[in-house]
Image (cartoon, helix red, strand yellow):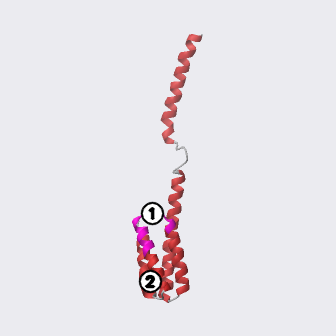
């Protein structure tokens, strides 16, 4: 009996390896995308929040409301900084910085232009 036990074990092990190798690629180990997917969703949400806040800042600037403009523009910049790294985000952040500088100096018209340019850059992907 022992001479038949070894070949059966080898056949069983080969069958197990074949089934595992066939099915493993179809079942991701950590779910659909895992942690990277969550990071990308968070970055996209920060980008959307930055766009929304920058639009609010532009509206406040057009109306001449300096305090609410600065609050919205600074919040938009914080969200844009958390939105990841790419050329459009960097340009949008730079525009928001210029908008905040001009808004603090009381130049509402220039701050509005920079904020609108920031919205345009942040909206691009």
In the rendered structure, find residue 21 and report the number of the disc placed on it: none
Residue 110 in the image: state x and y as whole percent. 42, 85
Magenta: predominant secondary structure element?
A: helix
Q: Quadrant of residue 12?
A: top right
Residue behind mark 1? 85
The residue located at (47%, 81%) in the rendering is 101
For mark 1, does the 10 Å Cα neighbourhood hold few (<14), some (14 to 19), or many (20 or more) residues? few
The residue located at (56%, 11%) in the rendering is 3
Quarter occupied by the N terminus: top right
Quarter occupied by the C terminus: bottom left
Disc 2 secondary structure class: helix
For mark 2, does the 10 Å Cα neighbourhood hold few (<14), some (14 to 19), or many (20 or more) residues? many
24 relative to 49, above or below: above
Using the image as rendered, state which of residue 8 and residue 79 is in the foreground: 79
94 relative to 44, above or below: below
Q: Is residue 118 visible?
A: yes
8 relative to 105, above or below: above
**Over which residues does the magenta segment extend?**
81-94
Q: Earlier in the sequence, mark 2 or mark 1?
A: 1
In the rendered structure, find residue 112 and report the number of the disc placed on it: 2
Residue 48 in the image: state x and y as whole percent. 50, 69
The residue located at (52%, 83%) in the rendering is 69
Disc 1 secondary structure class: loop
Magenta highlight on residue 44: no
């Amino acid at each position: 009996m022992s001479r038949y036990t070894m070949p059966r074990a080898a056949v069983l092990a080969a069958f197990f390896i074949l089934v595992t190798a066939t099915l493993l690629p179809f079942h991701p180990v950590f779910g659909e995308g895992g942690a990277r997917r969550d990071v990308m969703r968070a970055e996209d949400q920060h980008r959307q929040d930055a766009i929304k806040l920058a639009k609010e800042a532009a509206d406040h600037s057009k109306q001449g409301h300096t305090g609410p403009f600065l609050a919205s523009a600074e919040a938009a910049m914080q969200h844009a900084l958390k939105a990841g790294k790419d050329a459009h985000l960097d340009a949008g952040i730079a525009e928001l910085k210029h908008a905040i500088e001009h808004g603090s100096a009381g130049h509402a018209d220039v701050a509005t232009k920079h904020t609108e340019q920031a919205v345009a850059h942040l909206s691009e992907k």
